[in-house]
Image: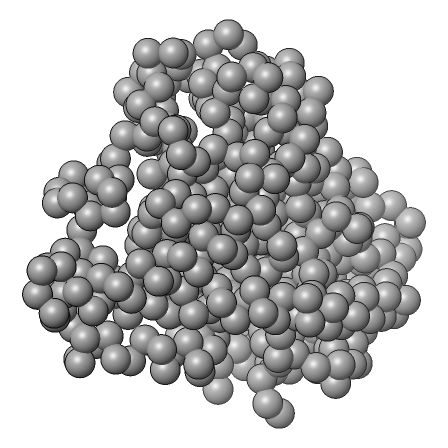
Amino acid sequence: MPQGPYSDIVMDHFMNPRNMGEIENADAVGEVGNPACGDVMKLYLKIEDGKIVDAKFKTFGCGAAIASSSITTEMIKGKTIDEALKISNEAVAEALGGLPPAKQHCSVLAEEALKVAIEDYNKKKGSG
Amino acid sequence: MKRVYFDHASATPVDRTVLKSMEPYFIENFGNPSSILIEEGAIPHRAVEEAREEIALLVGASKDEIIFTSSATESNNLAVKGLALANRDRGRRILFSDIEHYSIINQADFLRGIGFEIDFVKVDINGMLDMEDLKRKLTKDTILVSVMHANLEIGTIEPIKEMAYFLKEHNILFHSDGAGTCGTIPVNVKDLNVDTMTISPHQFYGPKGIAALYIKKGVRLTPIVQGGYQEMGYRAGTENVPAIVGFGKAARIAMEEMDKRVEKLTLLSKRLWEGLASSIDYIHFTGHPEKRLPGHVSFWIEFVEGESLLLWLNLNSIASSSGSACSSNVLAIDETGLKASHVLTAIGVPPEICHGSIAFSLGKDNTMEEVEHTLSVMPGIVKRLRDMSPLYERFKKTGVRDYKL
């Protein structure tokens, strides 16, 4: 197994990302980050009766960014919007078995992507 | 799968013959070379002087122009600080190229703090020093210029000789960091006409923890480490005898094998370069296409982040290095450590991209099979990473990039 700065869980999600891809006609899409920081994260959600029934992601970024996106989709699937919004970046980092200090922002990005996606959902719902 | 090591710019394995030459100087001949009047000291003293001779031969210097230090970083510090301090009565202005190693550029704040003025000279998109910018930035107050011989991140070899002759006309001192070139390609300090040059053996199958500085005869330089009278008074501290002996041996072997090594490296890197160019779209090679280190191939790939690429290469048993600070500073204590590479920024890689570049630096023991293995896995890795990139998805749908090329 890798002996670098990343935990085995991070490397597992990096090598075998869960829920990678797009959802056509997603109910919510959240994109955060910018290439300047080296990371861009895009989250797609399918929401039914206030519950996240499907989640997929696409991420341009380092190992920690890809792993953070991947584990976040796993953590939010099946949760209600309110429950999902309670997931903090610390919880994401913890689920990954920790992240190096310089990579903590990747878990923050995952939390932000989720928030932006849910804002997008509320906006769509409000206007629809 | 056996590891494919393409990161010789970071470190090379110590040659077995080199290691063997070092062994007697740990136990049998352990004496202090300063204790020259007793046999225990005279033997290591002689060994140090023989090594000095080999290193002088390697770079075309005389023996008393070679000073041993602990690292290329120390050599660069001794040269720049030493020349600056010894010549402060002549002026206070010092110029560095934009792509110098950290051991040069990170001296800027310290030197400013003690009254020097530091300015930086631009390079072009190939990483070649911009001579016009150098001329523009020279003033009567300029005493020293430092430009590395070759950059290990992008492979470009700088026109040192041309710069040196120009600077000599203006009576300005010239230091060049030769860590990337000495022992790898032919270097002659007299021909290059530099005042000081850094030489580092861990780039050519010698040990770490030892390096040298060439100091041209007659050049004034203030020592920065005070202590006993070792190294002709330029560098105090008991000599690292085994490492110095290994350094000398590595220099000897480098002289003997250089032509053969260069020929092989050129062949391997040509295939690697051509193979990548033909199998991967939107790839941008960095550094000068011809005036570059043999065996050095560097590039960045659009819609592929540098660290992820490096990690996947590593998982495929290929060791490379990334110019992207995102990966090299993964152990930084906080996110402020994640700055884009100053070298990539200097050569005009879009600053809003922290994609990171990859450098493959090949060595004497690499094979064509290893090159072919790398070429066989690269397209798959690139595809995998692009498939998960929202930037690529957008580019495919709209043809628009998130940044300007």
A38 displayed left or right of B283 = left
Residue shown at 40% from the left, 34% from the top: B217
Total label count? 0
B34 displayed left or right of B196 = left
- Name the image quarter holding residue B202: bottom left
**Which residue ends up furthest to the bottom in the rendered image?**
B1
Residue shown at 53% from the left, 35% from the top: B194
Up the image or down, A72 lies above or below B374; here it is: above
A64 or B101: nearer the viewer: B101
Tell me how the rendering is colored. one colour
B310 or B131: nearer the viewer: B131
**Which x, y percent locates residue B331?**
40, 60
Answer yes or no: is residue B368 visible.
yes
**Which x, y percent locates residue B269?**
75, 67
**Which residue ends up furthest to the top in the rendered image?**
B140
- Name the image quarter holding residue A90: bottom left
- Name the image quarter holding residue A43: bottom right
Up the image or down, A25 lies above or below B5; here it is: above
B135 displayed left or right of B183 = right
**Which x, y percent locates residue B46?**
26, 64
**Which x, y percent locates residue B405?**
81, 40
B356 or B228: nearer the viewer: B228
B361 or B392: nearer the viewer: B361
Answer yes or no: is residue A38 visible.
no
B295 displayed left or right of B197 = right
Q: Quadrant of the N terminus of chain B?
A: bottom right
Residue shown at 28% from the left, 70% from the top: B242
Residue shown at 47% from the left, 33% from the top: B195
